[in-house]
Amino acid sequence: MRELPSDQPIPGQSALRVVPANEASWDDMQAILTGTAGRCQCERQRLGDHDWWHMPERERGDLLRAETHCGDPRATETIGIVAYLGDEPAGWCAVDRRSVYGRLRGSPVPWKDRPHERKDDDTVWAIACLVVRKGLRHRHLTYDLVAAAVDHARARRGRRRGLPARHRRQGGHLGRDERRRRRPVRRRRISGGLASDQAPPGDAA
């Protein structure tokens, strides 16, 4: 997979094409998940800190591959979406039922001002991670990824939810004001849950 030049557009390409992760290849996924994201393999939010820390990096990758079903367009289950600019893999968004994210279940942030919500409610979906490929960052691609994640969750019967206003961008979470700032797509709501070690929209690691 060729390395993309930093901050240079791909000739003739401007719009993102987003597909469920099972319709993307594993090589494309790994082209996006580099550096810190490559070491994490998007498993810390699902496993929780303890189990994630003690799992070798290769096993994290094996687990992500099994969960995404990358390269199997006939799979009926997957756990996120992959974005392309032309034929180049550009971004990844982990979006799934909120109940599967062990780290979110143990964090007080998603439950603030929601004392009556059930942590095992599978109709509430959450965005756990957003990653934009190196060389394509700082172009606000994450806004389109969030909008696509909402549609992905809705298509799988996910119920859209917004974070309480006091949590706007705290700890990397997507607050409602952030989604409203630039264009109408950010008025769509979904329960956010970015990892604290992942960057906010526009600067995703």
Image: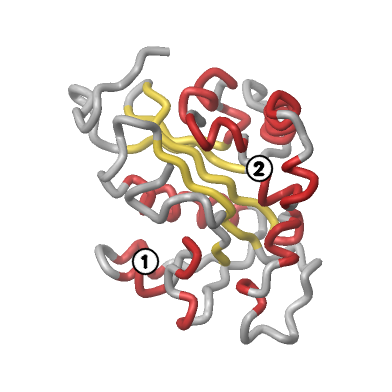
Residue 20: percent from left, percent from top:
57, 37
Color theme of the render: secondary structure
| Of 142 and 49, the residue lying toward us | 49
Q: Is residue 28 left or right of residue 84?
A: right
Q: In the rendered view of the protein, which quadrant contains the N terminus?
A: top left
Task: Please state the horizontal and vertical placement of residue 178, each as a whole percent of the image.
Answer: 35, 68
Task: Characterize the local packing of mark 2: few (<14), some (14-19) or many (20 or more) Cα atoms within 10 angstroms.
Answer: some
Residue wearing tag 1: 179
Q: For the residue labelled by badge 1, is the local secondary structure a helix, a strand or a loop? A: helix
Q: Is residue 41 above or below residue 146?
A: above
Cα separation, mark 2 vs mark 1, equals: 22 Å
Q: Which mark is residue 79?
A: 2
Kindly identify which numbered label has been placed on residue 197: none
**Residue 70, how many percent across, how many down?**
64, 26
The answer to whether the residue labelled 2 contacts the one labelled 1, judged by CB atoms less than 8 Å apart, is: no
- Quadrant of the rendered image containing residue 78: top right
Name the secondary structure under disc 2: loop
Which kind of residue does numbered mark 2 sit on? Ile
Q: How packed is label 1: few (under 14 Cα within 10 Å), some, or many (20 or more)?
A: many
Which residue does the image show at 67% across and 51% down from the upper left?
45
- Which quadrant would the C terminus be assigned to in this image? top left
Residue closer to the observer: 106 or 84: 106
The quarter of the displayed image where residue 117 is located: bottom right
* Three-letter code, disc 1: Arg
Q: Earlier in the sequence, mark 2 or mark 1?
A: 2
Residue at 58% across, 46% down: 94
Question: In the rendering, at what x and y percent does residue 157 appear?
Answer: 66, 59
Residue found farthest to the top: 1
Quarter assignment of residue 10: top left
Residue depicted at x 63% and y 72%: 110
Query: How many discs appear?
Result: 2
